[in-house]
Image (cartoon, grey):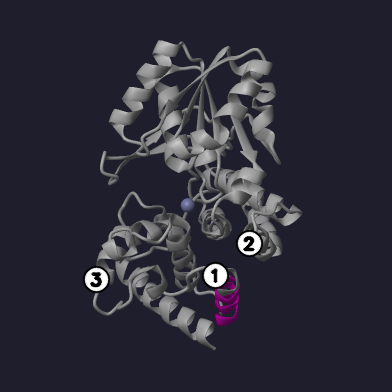
Amino acid sequence: MTSVFKSPSTYVQGRNVTTDIGTHAESLGDTALLVADEIVMDMIESDVHESLAEAGLDGSSVVFNGESSEDEIERIASVAVDEGADIVIGAGGGKALDTAKAVREEVGGAMVSMPTIASMDAPTSSLSVIYSEHGEFEDYWYYEQHPDLVIVDTEVVAAAPARFLRSGIADGLATWFEADAVAQSGGDNEVGGKPTRAGHKLAELCYETLREHGAGALDAVEHDAVTESVDAVIEANTLLSGLGLESGGLAAAHSVHNGLTQLAETHDATHGEKVNIGTITQLVLEGHSDARIEEFIEFSVELGLPVTLGEIGITNPEQVDLDVVAEAACDEAETIHDEPFDVTPAMVRDALLTADEMGRRVRDR
Ligand SMILES: [Zn+2]
């Protein structure tokens, strides 16, 4: 039984840290390539290049087309080679960061993650989600190396629509329940070993931080404001959730999410919104007390997170095939099998229907 913990080398977070990127990236190489879509490029390009130049680094940019597809990765990798880049900086959402990670894997050198939203675990992780040109999920690519530097500008993140932070909170809340299930079952984490105490505790700290600061942080970002609560939640969504998920491990909530993506009706719901339904389903599946489940649902409602299937697009659960969701959630590669008991599709379907009913009852009372 071998425990493994992996993480990026450096994590930097604060207001306006975009303008310090050169200082933090200085030791990583000589020539940086900034990868970002048009909108993010407009937002940060001049600050990034100015800071790189001050630190004595050469820098160039390439506009990302928005899809982390094999073709786009090839195109950007050839730009990186032409520019002689030994540092790839990915800025933006998950797809931009995942593309930059794939490019670094291909051309070597260092990788810098610069998330502009706090809705996902991509900034700190050592994998890319690969899509087709048309945005259909294709594959996960796993890497030996983590990003060398993760740099998060809280002012930029707070200025993004609140829905992103809210979704990231849902994803972060799930991290604890999933890591705890893996710890109980003795299952594997996502970095090739058993969870360390550190991975487990970081997931718990993620949950506690979000419970203490989630609502206040959302109030602040509705006004693009940065407060201590915003700072705490960005760290929880990005660092604690990212490390907690990789080194603590995933269980039912993300498998239910993956199952839900089978239904076209759910495609307008974000990753975190679907994960929240997965978390409630996991709690039902694990047989927690009514009070415990209702308390989680109440907190979700307070934050504006979905607690019913209707809120993620499945307005008539009787008419869609929840067996398809349950079957997909129980695929043999799924992390649901890291729950401390055997899980069958019938159990998942029944837990989903029950979670939906409980969500409606608690929300409407
Ligand atoms: Zn997630």
In the rendered image, residue 138 lying in the magenta stretch gets the answer no
In whole angstroms, how far apart are the C-alphas of marks 2 and 3?
34 Å
**Residue 321 marker:** 3
Q: Residues within 10 Å of mark 1 (few under 14, many from 20)?
A: some
**Which numbered disc flags the more N-terminal residue, 3 or 1?**
1
Res. 125 in view: no
- The spot of residue 219 in percent (x, y) is 66, 64
The answer as to whether callout 3 falls within 8 Å of ligand 1 is no
Q: Name the residue under label 2.
A: 218
| Image location (x, y in percent) of residue 107 | 42, 17
Evaluate if marks 2 and 1 touch, with contact meaning CB atoms under 8 Å apart: yes
Residue farthest to the bottom, as pictured: 365
Residue span colored magenta: 290-299
Question: Residue 217 is drawn in which quadrant?
Answer: bottom right
Query: How far is disc 2 from disc 1 in space, using C-alphas?
Result: 10 Å
Whether residue 295 appears in magenta in the rendering, the answer is: yes
Cβ at disc 2 under 8 Å from ligand 1: no
